[in-house]
Amino acid sequence: MPGSPRRRELITFLVLAFGIWPVVAVGVVGGYGFLVWMFQILYGPPGPPGH
């Protein structure tokens, strides 16, 4: 028997919790920041128009 299901479940949880999800979170936040940055390059910063 290669390993107990409990051990495999723990390893899977650790890989997800400390490996995959932090990378996904950084990618989502970075992607949102990039979209806001590109929008501001095309349409200008938020706020009332300048005089």
Image (tube, helix red, strand yellow):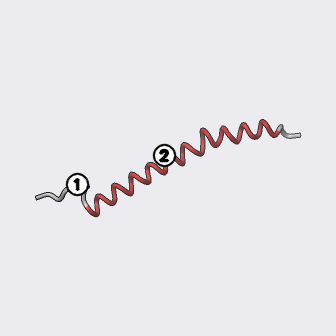
SS at badge 1: loop
Residue 13 left/right relative to 18: right
Residue lying farthest to the front in this orientation: 48
Q: CA distance from mark 1 to mark 2?
A: 28 Å
Q: Quadrant of the C terminus?
A: bottom left
- Above or below residue 12? Residue 32 is below
- Mark 2, other Cα within 10 Å: few <14 / some 14–19 / many ≥20: few
What's the residue at 66%, 38% (across, down)? 14
What's the residue at 17%, 59% (across, down)? 49
Query: According to the image, label 2 marks what residue?
Result: 26
Residue lying farthest to the bottom in this orientation: 42
Residue 25 left/right relative to 41: right
Q: How many marks?
A: 2
Residue 18 left/right relative to 30: right
- Above or below residue 6? Residue 28 is below
Query: According to the image, label 1 marks what residue?
Result: 47
Give the number of the mark in front: 1 or 2: 1
Residue 4, image quadrant: top right
What's the residue at 72%, 37% (across, down)? 10
> How far across and how far down the image is residue 27, in percent?
49, 50
> How far across and how far down the image is residue 13, in percent?
68, 40
Could you tell me the amino acid type at mark 2?
Answer: Val
Which sits earlier in the primary sequence, circle 1 or circle 2? 2
Residue 7, image quadrant: top right
- Above or below residue 39? Residue 6 is above
